[in-house]
Image (cartoon, rainbow, N blue to C red):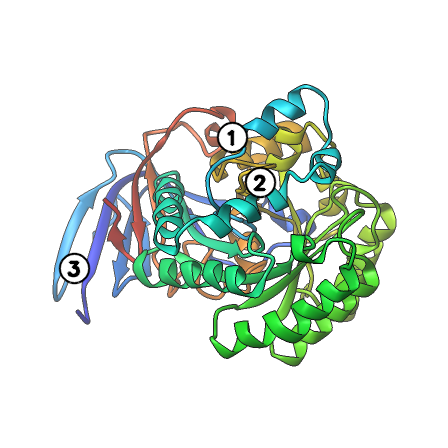
Amino acid sequence: MKGDQLLIKNIGLLVVDNHGKSCLCGEEMSQLEVVRDAWLLIEDGRFKEWGYQNTPLPSLKGSRWETDAEGGAVLPSFCDPHTHLVYADSREGEFVDKIRGLSYAEIARRGGGILNSADRLHALSEEELYRQAMHRIDEIIRKGTGTVEIKSGYGLNTEDELKMLRVIRRIKETSPIKVVSTFLGAHAVGRAYTGRQSDYVDHSINEMLPEVVRQGLADYIDVFCDEGFFTIEETDRILKAGARYGLRGKIHAQELADSGGVEVAVRNNALSVDHLESMTDNDIRLLCSQSAVKSTPTTFPTALPGTSFFLNMPFAPARKMISAGLPLALASDYNPGSTPSGDMKFVLSLACIKMRLLPAEALNATTLNAAAAMGLSHDYGSIARGKVANCFVTEPISSIDYLPYAYTSPVVRRVFLGGEEYR
């Protein structure tokens, strides 16, 4: 109802955004404005105002109610700009294979990995796929995530890619979390096209993509541009085809090798280039050069520290990216093979422990910059006047630094999405 108001009072620490920027770059990422002993006013599902607890509280009007943070911190909800959380069942057998020494690439060559998930998804009903996905959605919401990108890519044929994307659309329609949908038909070569990768690329462009667009099922298009997957030339073709239909790119690159993915991402004005475990100094220069040409960054580097942790591989050079003045974003990569976790608080901790980010830098990378890597920072990613009221209340904590420090402690106590408490 118009004029509905919610006042959250007795906030121990409130993280707010007074700068009004769409993202934070380089040294700016260490900036964090924290108000102690505060109140926060939400109106019509958006942040309205805040102030100190010892100052007069605003007079409420219309339909109104109050709630007590009981000394807990209030932070903007996490934004997760890279996930594959719509999938069929787990792959713990491959987890054991990794323990025994098999690499990600070796497992893929043996028919595991993405193809394994594609086989399982094909056999699963759409209803069961939705049920499993909603269980994961509930999990990440309760851990503090309020905005998420979900990719297809475990279908690898027209029928099953559309099935995945319909499930993602249904999540958009039935869950309070903000969802961005990405078409990832070029995640791997489908089994029906084994040995005919070029034909599969044609199939993805000429059959899958037009139908995805006709049904309005995707916001972005993605390609796994890496060694053993899709080449620079194939990636370029797919991104250009997506652009003709109005779908901007968000690509996987530089995970397994120096594949040239950053270059093709920049050339095609991709919104983000993700993974970057094998990122080079030249890649960083390329991203800096495209930022220098335009007033705001156009291709966001997005690191996935959970992948490095789970696969025991190098972490993306986050410290170098920030030192170079780039706007780093962080994501979970939630998927059944390489990162079976959507816990963004753990991503926050990994960024600090393994990538040497300061807590403020990591928090900005998992909120405002992560929202920007989905094209959503005008409405999400920070507690700013007029933005959608996605936030969470923690147990009382001594400082924001406690969040990454207490890397397994479940500190999120209450969650608000669009100003409504999630229960």
Label disc, if present, on residue 39 of the rendered structure: none
Label disc, if present, on residue 362 of the rendered structure: 2
SS label for mark 2: helix
The crowding category of the residue bearing disc 1, from other C-alpha atoms within 10 Å (few below 14, some 14 to 19, many at least 20), is many
Nearer-the-camera pick, 8 or 375: 375
Nearer-the-camera pick, 202 or 417: 202
Amino acid tagged 2: Ala
Does residue 356 appear in the picture of this structure?
A: no
Residue with the mark numbered 3:
59
SS label for mark 3: loop
* Separation (CA) of disc 1 from disc 2: 9 Å
Q: Are marks 2 and 3 in contact (CB under 8 Å)?
A: no
Work out which quarter of the rendered image holds the C terminus and state it. Answer: top left
Q: Are marks 3 and 1 in contact (CB under 8 Å)?
A: no
Tag 3 or tag 2, which sits nearer the N-term? 3
Residue at left offset 34%, top offset 54%? 127
* Separation (CA) of disc 2 from disc 3: 36 Å
Amino acid tagged 3: Ser
Does residue 183 appear in the picture of this structure?
A: yes
Residue at left offset 66%, top offset 29%? 354
x, y percentage for residue 29? 61, 47
Tag 1 or tag 3, which sits nearer the N-term? 3
- Which mark is in front, 2 or 3? 2
The crowding category of the residue bearing disc 2, from other C-alpha atoms within 10 Å (few below 14, some 14 to 19, many at least 20), is many
Q: Are marks 1 and 2 in contact (CB under 8 Å)?
A: yes
Label disc, if present, on residue 404 of the rendered structure: 1
Q: Quadrant of residue 24?
A: bottom right
Work out which quarter of the rendered image holds the N terminus and state it. Answer: bottom left
Tag 2 or tag 1, which sits nearer the N-term? 2
